[in-house]
């Protein structure tokens, strides 16, 4: 501590759990600044996962399907995950098989650019499938 005071710097405890505790003589404000800078760089390197959704009906027409499939391809090429779901309104829940066939067809059509993360699952009135982009 006397050495730190004579140099007009601070005695900073780096690792308090070690025995003996590790300390450094340095300028505390500069130490904090560098620490924040390191954390900012690490945070910038982490990738953010974006999930895009596409909604179908159980009796979706061919043209509508192709239109939504093009959007799904665009989302996967951008690197976003895709959540495609069929929403069953009212009594349309009797078309569960049609909804599942539609989602499996979408997964098969997007096979080259995406891989299925989760197969179609019925949750309440929604049947959902997750597709992740393939690594380049």
Image (cartoon, rainbow, N blue to C red):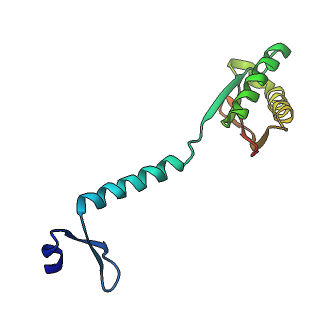
Quadrant including the C terminus: top right
Quadrant of the image occupied by residue 59: top right
Q: Where is residue 56, by image quadrant?
A: top right
Give how far across and how far down residue 84 sits, in percent: 71, 30
In the image, what residue occupies the spot 13% across and 75% down? 6
Badge count: 0
Position of the N terminus by quadrant: bottom left
Closer-to-camera residue (109/85): 109
Residue at image point 13% right, 73% down: 5
52 vs 2, left or right, is: right
Relative to 25, residue 60 above or below: above
Residue at x 19% of width, y 68% of height: 9
Q: Position of residue 122 (x, y in %)?
A: 71, 36
**Residue 25 shows in this picture:** yes
Image coordinates of residue 68 in percent, x first then y, are: 75, 21
Q: Residue at x 27, y 73 (%)?
A: 13
The picture quadrant where one finds residue 65 is top right
Q: Is residue 59 visible?
A: no
């Amino acid at each position: 501590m006397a050495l730190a005071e004579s140099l007009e710097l601070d005695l900073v405890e780096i690792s308090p759990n070690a025995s003996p505790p590790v300390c450094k003589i340095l300028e505390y404000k500069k130490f904090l600044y560098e620490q924040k800078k390191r954390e900012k760089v690490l945070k910038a390197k982490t990738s953010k996962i974006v999930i895009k959704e596409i909604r179908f009906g159980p009796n979706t027409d061919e043209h509508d399907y192709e239109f939504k499939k093009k959007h799904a391809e665009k989302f996967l090429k951008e690197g976003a995950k895709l959540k495609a779901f069929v929403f069953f309104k009212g009594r349309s829940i009797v078309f569960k098989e049609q909804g599942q066939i539609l989602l499996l067809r979408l997964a098969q059509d997007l096979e080259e650019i995406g891989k299925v993360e989760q197969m179609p699952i019925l949750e309440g009135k929604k049947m959902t499938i997750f597709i992740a982009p393939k690594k380049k």
